Amino acid sequence: MKGKFKLFSNSLLSKLAGWKEDHLIKPLKRYGALVVKEIKVLINDKGAMIITYVIPLIVVLVLTIGSSGQIISTDDSSNSARINELFKNEIPIIGIIDYDQSEGFPDRDLSSDFLAKFQEAQTEGLCTLFETTNQSELEFLLGDGEINAFIIIPPMFEFNLSIHLPVIIPIVIDSINTVNLQSTQQIVDSIIQDFKQENDFTGVFKIDKNLVNVPDKNQIFFAAAPYIIPLVIFGIGCLTSTQSIVSDIPKDRMVLTPTNKGEMMLAKVSANILIQLGVVIIFIITSLFVNLQIMSNYFMYFIVLFLMEINAVLIGVAISAISKTPLAAYQYFIFVFIFQIVAILFIENPMILMTMPLYNGYQLLLQIVLRGQTFWSVRVNFFSLAVESLIIYFIGYIVFKIQKTML
Amino acid sequence: MSEDILSDTRSRLLRITNMVRKEVKTLISDKTAMFILFFIPFLLILILGTSQPNLEATKTTIWIIDYDHSERSEQFIETMKSLNLSLAVGQRLTPKIYASGEFAPIEPDLGEVESYGNVTEELARRTITTQYLDAYIILPQGFEQDISINGTTTIIVYYDAIDFTKMIVSDMIVLVGSSEIQVKNMLFERDIIYFPETRPKNYDLNILDLGAPYFVPLMLFFTMQLISTQSIVGDIPLRRLLNTSLKRGEVITGKLIAYTIIGIFQVLLSMSMLSIFKVTMHCLWLDLFLILLLNSIVGITMGIFISTITKSRLQASQLFLLLFFLMYINVYYVRNIFFLTFIPIEQTRIVYEFLAYRGKGMLSLWAPIMYMGITGLFFYLASVIYIKFIKKEFI
């Protein structure tokens, strides 16, 4: 009697086994086979694979070796060192007039020394100097875009300083050329600060400046990383995935197999994630190689990049699912990509910004990786990234499911 | 002899015209392509035309740690709190200043929506690494005494240098604040003070005006470039066409003209939108149209070149991305002058600024226009040479 006691009857057990086989093991096997097939398809396009992995390498190389990498110097000793390296190639043309005829320091002509400081900067290749005695000419040239700024050394310059009074120097900068505006301001500021330090003309408040969180090396990469890394990960991940369904011609024959559209989409997502993982790993390794200063750890760095990658692939596959032609898929990608690039620079509305993977990726990378904050502090960006990925993916799935392809 | 040349030219023109007609038809029949090509400029210009500038980067938080607790130090804090600053483009700066003893926002712990901490040097040292603090100023003990005895005193400022823009803004706030305190309190000592004035004053410009030289060329260039990256590699019937009298070089010319025709309408739409939002144009409409069209044409030639040298659609778009990143990084970060010369979006920006804002004529801007022409011509010729002599699929 004991041996005959069973919790479930034989028929129920066999039904359970059958259900398990049909609903778990077989779909998993199909899924596994599909993932392998997708990876093979992706790897077969060797040119595309090479470019995929070369892009992050080139980007890091250009931002590190391609530039000297120094944005901010911690050394205050020379003005050339303090010039923002980001603008080192923007040599501004600066007009200057010396109106000072006053006396005050017996052994020197202070306004000439001040002028000499700019001439020295010109010799060092930091600026091009345009010396004149006609202010109207400078005003005209500034309006015409021929010079980027002009400086007036006012009358009584030397005398006021000699009697311990401050002097105000009029500086006019061209606001149309916004690229040169920053570099001009930086260079003028650097030269004047240098002159002030050398002569101890530091005013009532001697400001002792200290920079925190600034790396010694590869500052351009450090500054660009929160923008560029999400841009590259999203660009490559999303673009590659946009072709996964729409360019898959044999998928229509899948109708003859038990494979359903959900499994197909999931397999494509998984395969693309696995392939794009290489991009994430390349970023991690190159960051280690160039000593990117991070305040968290490399595991956290990996998690953040991995999240961005999943988001990019999910959006890409969804685009692919809703597109009718490969070209249409590319166009949807352009729309999403270019819209974000432009909008992130100009739009302030947090609700709009939060919908953009690039913005959320920027926040995650900056706050968690570079600043060492917790996920909790940027939970809004994290949830926004996760929720939008899932919503877009499911919309893509629904559209794909009701499409007539594969019937 | 001359009749032969004439007839050859005529048949060549006929073939190219037919190619252009076929290509334009194909492009127009792709409704999504048309929608995206024209919807992107429409939507972006509409959003930017109705948006406020992104001032997130200029919203700074500064703490002042006062160890002196004197009348002078309190004056310093009060002046810093009442600062009224504006940026070069006219927007007001409103820094958040918190002094010792006040509660300032800090990084919240797990489960907390927001958190506040009492402003101290210890907390500032921990918070400066986070997004909640951009700079802190330490007013040392003897602050007031130093000023009254020596006429000068030292203040220590720590800046968070991760966010470069905020660091510059914080630095400016400290500089302007300390100058204002001197003026308000008649504290004078040898100093060279300067507040850069910008001209022309851009107070009336909207966000579209400010961003147009940057984003309009970028948007037109990359949309046309990406669309044209698929022109050869995605043209399946092209192989059959090449069995006819159509020459390979004519394919490139035909594609270039066809995409340019689409580009003309895209530029026209963008410019009409800019005009609707009354974006500054102190120049002939035609001048700006021509320069934006040249920008699109160079984008198309680069796109066709990519399409010619690649073997699959995916490769073509990947190569597009690579080029895009290189251009983007050079324009916005590295700024290598040599490469900038041959990056059309940079040259178009320069020409756009001179035409639309300074009212200059096209002739005075021959150099950037020539660079763009050279770039376009280079990629056009490279495409012709590649498709004629190197591309194996068609040989």
Image: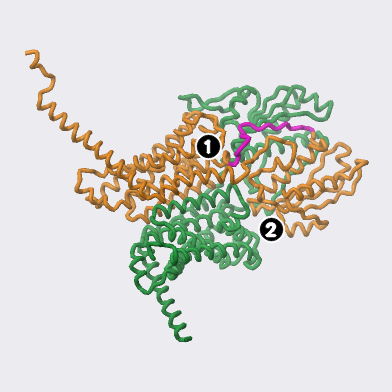
Chain colours: A orange, B green
Name the residue beneath numbered marker 1: A287
Q: Quadrant of the rendered structure where residue B310 is?
A: bottom left
Residue lying at the far left of the rendered structure: A1
Q: Residue B40 is drawn in which quadrant?
A: bottom left
Chain-order first, disc 2 or disc 1: 2
Question: x, y (%) of residue A359?
Answer: 49, 41
Nearest to the observer: residue A142 or residue B347: B347
Residue A87 placed where, x, y %? Answer: 65, 47
Q: Residue at horizontal 41%, vertical 79%?
A: B11
In what element is the residue under mark 2?
Answer: loop
Residue that extends furthest to the top in the rendered view of this protein: A2
Residue furthest to the right in view is A106
The chain under label 2 reads A
Where residue B3 sits in the image (x, y, percent)? 45, 86
Quarter of the figure with residue A110: top right
Q: Find out whether residue B16 is within the magenta segment.
A: no
Label 2 sits on what residue type? Gly
Tag 1: Cα neighbours inside 10 Å, few (<14), some, or many (≥20)?
some
Q: Residue at x 54, y 50 (%)?
A: B328
Q: Residues within 10 Å of mark 2 (few under 14, many from 20)?
A: some
- Extent of the magenta region: A204-220
| Residue at which label 2 appears | A145
Q: What residue type is labelled 1?
A: Ser
Q: Is mark 1 on a helix, strand or loop?
A: helix
- Residue A205 colored magenta? yes
Which residue is found at the position 41% from the left and 39% from the top?
A277
Location of the N terminus of chain A by quadrant is top left
Q: Do labels 2 and 1 share a chain?
A: yes
Q: In this view, does A168 lie above or below A133?
A: above
Q: Return the chain for callout 1.
A: A
